[in-house]
Image: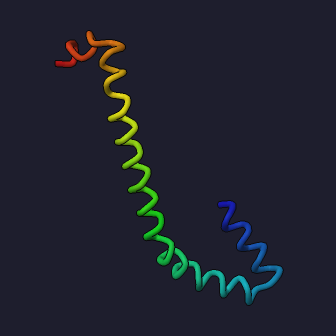
Amino acid sequence: MRTFILWCLLFVVCWPLAIVAILLYPLIWLILLPFRILGFAVHEVFQVVHLVLRLPFLLLRAPFRVLRLA
């Protein structure tokens, strides 16, 4: 909603720039999409590494929880 209001304000102030912005937005979104996917993948890999490193400590802290789950 905030983006739409800012675009409307830009349209009132300088309509040619607003039209160019609305036309280039999908192209810029497509160019940036691989970087978003890569960022998501890197985040998930770091989360898996973090969980693997924490697993021994979780098992030592409360071994009865593992038996209850099994």
Which residue corresponds to the image point at 33% horizontal and 12% vertical from the top-left?
62
Vertical arrangement, residue 11 with respect to residue 43, above or below:
below
Q: Give left or right: position of 16 versus 32.
A: right
Res 65 → quadrant: top left
Vertical arrangement, residue 67 with respect to residue 18, above or below:
above
Vertical arrangement, residue 56 with respect to residue 28, above or below:
above
Q: Residue furthest top?
A: 64
Q: Residue furthest bottom?
A: 16
Res 70 → quadrant: top left
Q: Looking at the rendering, in which quadrant would you find the N terminus?
A: bottom right
- Which one is in front, 13 or 43? 43
| Colour scheme of the rendered structure | rainbow
Q: Residue furthest right?
A: 13
Vertical arrangement, residue 68 with respect to residue 45, above or below:
above
Return the x and y of residue 22 as percentages of the image width and height: 62, 81
Which residue corresponds to the image point at 55% horizontal and 78% vertical from the top-left?
28
Q: Give left or right: position of 19 versus 37.
A: right
Res 37 → quadrant: bottom left
Return the x and y of residue 29 as percentages of the image width and height: 52, 74
- Which one is in front, 21 or 30? 30
Return the x and y of residue 10 as percentages of the image width and height: 77, 76
Which residue corresponds to the image point at 67% horizontal and 86% vertical from the top-left?
19
Q: Count of labels shown?
A: 0
Return the x and y of residue 48 as percentages of the image width and height: 35, 42
